[in-house]
Amino acid sequence: MSDTENPMSVYTAIRSRRDVRAEFTGQIVEDDVLHRILDAAHHAPSVGNTQPWDFVIVRSPETLAEFGKHVADERVAFAESLPADRRETFDPIRIEGIETSGTGIVVTYDPERGGQHVLGRATVDETGIFSAVLAVQNLWLAAISERIGVGWVSFYQEQFLSELLGIPAPVRPIAWLCVGPVSEFQTVPDLERFGWRPRRPLSQAIHREKFGG
């Protein structure tokens, strides 16, 4: 379904966006839809127009299963580090849909793209990785507009993922995104629904003139 057939406003997409875990149908996202989503990601703004991202599409069942096992082990390690009350809250929260989504998109960041003198990065080096994260945001909102779910997996060791996908240093994997059709989008985000943490009201996030003002 393209945006010309059933347009969605950017505000609707932002409010509809969910970190999908349990709702993947098991169907594979169609290649033309995936291309549109990646094209949107590739049009993200970037410092010095370096476009420091790349997108690794992973569909091998063996690779998905191997990464899924690694993430499951990391989930257990995190759960064991929690106080009893927080672990009880965390236990029912599903943190990945790696195999059920059928498609992983790994977004990478190349700090050397653009050379030594990157316009706009001289004093704030992190603007490079910020640029790659903006590509993730573009991808996510484009996916929502196509009624495609996205889940961001962060329970992994970076070195493990780099070795699994043959990502050469100094390129870094910054996000594994599970991407695929879903049965539904939850009305309330999972971390709010399961009581992990509520959303802050906007009024608490706005400051006037100085922080705390």
Image (cartoon, rainbow, N blue to C red):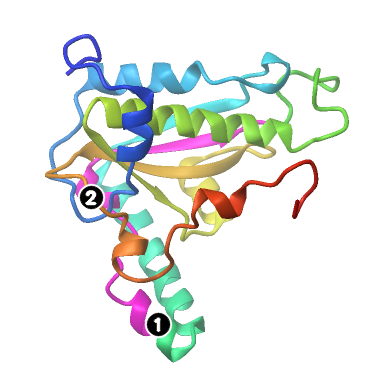
Residue at image point 18% right, 16% down: 6
Residue bearing mark 2: 187
Please rate how many residues cluster around mark 1, counting C-alpha atoms within 10 Å: few if below 14, some from 14 to 19, many from 20. Answer: some
Q: Earlier in the sequence, mark 2 or mark 1?
A: 1
Q: Position of residue 181 (x, y in %)?
A: 18, 37
State the residue in front, 204 or 76: 204
- Quarter in which the N terminus is drawn: top left
SS state under label 1: helix
In-image side of 61 versus 76 (left or right): left
Q: Is residue 71 above or below residue 103?
A: below
Asked which quadrant contains residue 122, the reply is top right
Distance CA(mark 2)–CA(mark 1): 24 Å
Q: Position of residue 160 (x, y in %)?
A: 52, 55
SS state under label 2: loop
Is residue 104 visible in the rendered image? The answer is no
Q: Amino acid at mark 1?
A: Arg
Q: Is residue 90 above or below residue 121?
A: below
State the residue in front, 98 or 152: 152
Residue at image point 69% right, 38% down: 170
Closer to the eye: label 2 or 1: 2
Is residue 79 visible in the rendered image? The answer is yes
Answer whether labels 2 and 1 touch (C-beta < 8 Å): no
In-image side of 123 versus 161 (left or right): right
Residue at image point 28% right, 26% down: 145
Q: Position of residue 53 (x, y in %)?
A: 57, 27
Residue bearing mark 1: 87
Residue stretch rendered in magenta on the structure: 87-110
Residue at image point 46% right, 48% down: 164
In-image side of 176 versus 115 (left or right): left
Q: How many marks?
A: 2
- Asked whether 89 falls inside the magenta stretch, the response is yes
In-image side of 26 versus 210 (left or right): left
